[in-house]
Amino acid sequence: MEYSAATAILINGSCCTLEILKSAYTRFRCV
């Protein structure tokens, strides 16, 4: 159970990081 929760948090965190990088990249390209 703990391992599953940790994995879910890790995947969710990487997704958030990906979204932030994507938005920052598009913003940089626009400028």
Image (cartoon, rainbow, N blue to C red):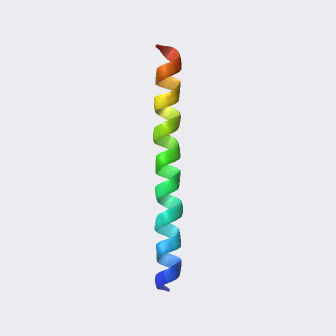
Residue, x 47% and y 76% (percent of image)?
Answer: 5
Examine the rendered structure and indicate whether residue 28 appears above or below residue 22.
above
Examine the rendered structure and indicate whether residue 10 appears above or below residue 19.
below
* Residue at the bottom extreme of this rendering: 1
Examine the rendered structure and indicate whether residue 14 appears above or below residue 4.
above
Residue, x 51% and y 28% (percent of image)?
Answer: 25
Examine the rendered structure and indicate whether residue 30 appears above or below residue 11.
above
Residue, x 47% and y 23% (percent of image)?
Answer: 27
Q: Position of residue 4 (x, y in %)?
A: 53, 78
Q: Position of residue 29 (x, y in %)?
A: 53, 18
* Residue at the top extreme of this rendering: 31
Residue, x 48% and y 32% (percent of image)?
Answer: 23
Q: Position of residue 26 (x, y in %)?
A: 52, 25
Numbered disc total: 0
Q: Position of residue 15 (x, y in %)?
A: 52, 52
